[in-house]
Amino acid sequence: MPNPNTLASNSPRLNKAWFESWFDSPYYEEIYDHRDLSEAKEFILQLTTTLGLPITAQILDLGCGWGRHTHSFAELGYTTTGLDLSPRLIAKAQENFIQPNNPISERMKFYIGDMRDFQLNTDFDAVVNLFTSFGYFDDKNQDLKVLGNAHRHLKEDGLLVLDFFNKEFVLSQINESEYRYGPNFDTKISRTLADGYVLKSIEIIHQKSGAITEVYVEKVRCYCPEELQSMLKSSGFEVLQHWGNYQLSPAGQGSPRCIFLARKS
């Protein structure tokens, strides 16, 4: 297996995309600190109970960030691998969760890698792609590569959980701005729709001067549920369930999330 600090990819990218800059920035974790470990534990318990995954299942957390879902799986007894492109977030995951002689730590591994072309010498029982870790690329074919690579890393009849935002819900909030006040900096977050993408502008504001010190952008393709379902089918998956929130209630037009359960066919 590759070293956790080695990019598990055959195609290094010289020009940084928005997700490379933003997720590796020192501001990302504080802005999303409300998405914490307790929230992840609650969702993962609900998910594993609903799926009936045996405790022997091996799980890949694809786009794992700082590892809150990876750790939640391992805490329940599952052997789990977390993979993310951000060296900063993977280092944070290892710092938080990998401890000597800890049985939970022994069930976790973290790797730096690109979702499109990583190579791990493991066939997993389940792959999860959570918290809108999809739709980041300018070319739709690159999103299909993510699904194809997930498919290749699954055992026959293995399961994929794809957690995306619900387009109708997000569009109902478009052009709205919000301010967040943190211990180290303030933030203005604005959302717009442009050329089929949801753009989230994140302005970092100096607390004393009120000056904007840095600006980041999240850019996610605005897929509707039907498009995602079609992409899953074309990538070799059979869609089994469609949920609308982290409580795994049936999806509806006003649901905040679009969570698909699919099986490798």
Image (cartoon, rainbow, N blue to C red):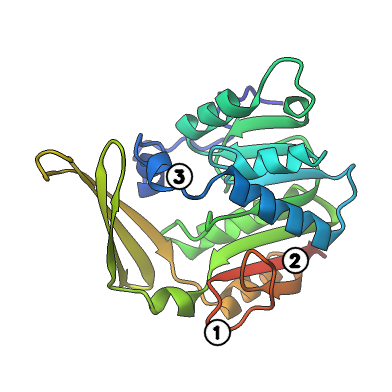
Q: Residue at x 64, y 75 (%)?
A: 230
Res. 33 mark: 3
Above or below: residue 43 compared with residue 169: above
Q: Circle 3 sits in a helix, a strand or a loop, which is it? A: loop
Res. 174 mark: none
Q: Residue 119: in sight, yes or no? A: no
Whole-angstrom CA distance, mark 3 to mark 2, is 29 Å
Q: Residue at x 67, y 48 (%)?
A: 41
Quadrant including the C terminus = bottom right
Q: Residue at x 56, y 23 (%)?
A: 95
Q: Who is closer to the viewer here, 150 or 185? A: 185
Q: Which residue does the numbered mark 2 point to in the structure image?
A: 262
Extreme-top residue of the structure: 100
Q: Which residue does the numbered mark 1 point to in the structure image?
A: 253
* Relative to 129, 177 lies left or right: left
Q: Position of residue 54 (x, y in %)?
A: 90, 49
Extreme-bottom residue of the structure: 253
